Amino acid sequence: MEDDFDDLAYLREQVSILIAGGFFNEDDLETYLAELAFDPHSAPHAAAVRDHARAAFAAKRTAEAGWPAVTDWDRLDTAFTALEADGIMALHNAGMTTSDAHSDAWDMISRDAPGTWRGFAFYHGQDVERAISGGALYIGFDAVAQGSAAKQAVGEAIIAALRSAGFAPEWNGDPETRLNVPGIVWQKRTEWVRPATATRTGLWQRLFG
């Protein structure tokens, strides 16, 4: 029984973090719940997780109504847009780890014409979780060209873009070290949609009724 409670507590916490991050909407919840069906430890908690998520979504909608017109995340997005115009691919919420982010970035860069990008910047899911908790947002980066000079130039461009957006980023200048944005208030508006399934059908219906 205690293990069941721990499983449910973990799932609720995980969903709460996903919702607070702003990259997880009602459709994503349906996908998440469908995936729980294949885990014997998680499947029994699907209904409780759904109820928890719906309450968290409602609370976030209410909170968003009181946010400033331009949040820190909006300014971060402005900085990332400026970086892309400067030839630096900028990825929000790129996987869960630095390895995930690098893999995603290099894959996307390889699909574009040579010379399109001179580097990339990113933060990943664990970085989002830290920022939600009030910590600094860490931003990683790399250069397409080899050598520390090219990578340092990308880092300097990221610092400049963040400063232009109103942040006070910190970096020791080492191209092998991630920079960070202290004091960021994580307020990303969710891209709300209608639920993916108004009624429970198919696999979900058979499994959970």
Image (spheres, grey):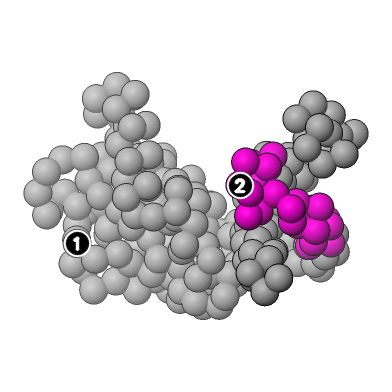
Name the residue at the front extreme: 1
Q: Position of residue 178 (x, y in %)?
A: 30, 64
Quick one: label 1, few (<14), some, or many (20+) residues within 10 Å? some
Amino acid carrying mark 2 in the image:
Asp
Name the residue at the right extreme: 199
Q: Position of residue 31 (x, y in %)?
A: 68, 39
Q: Position of residue 202 (x, y in %)?
A: 79, 26
Element carrying mark 2: loop
Is 14 on the left or on the right of 184, as rendered?
A: right
> What secondary structure is the magenta-colored segment mainly?
helix
Residue bearing mark 1? 176
Of 100 and 14, the residue lying toward us: 14
- Give the alpha-carbon distance from disc 2 to disc 1, as whole Å: 39 Å
Is 46 on the left or on the right of 125, as rendered?
A: right
Figure check: 19 above or below 132: above
Amino acid carrying mark 1 in the image:
Glu
Residue bearing mark 2? 39
Element carrying mark 1: loop
Q: Which quadrant is home to the N terminus?
A: bottom right
Answer whether residue 54 is magenta in the image. yes
Q: Nearer the viewer, mark 2 or mark 1?
A: 2
Asked if marks 2 and 1 touch (Cβ < 8 Å), the reply is no
Is 92 on the left or on the right of 171, as rendered?
A: right
Residue at image position (25%, 49%) is 142
Of 196 and 202, the residue lying toward us: 202
Residue at image position (58%, 70%) is 132
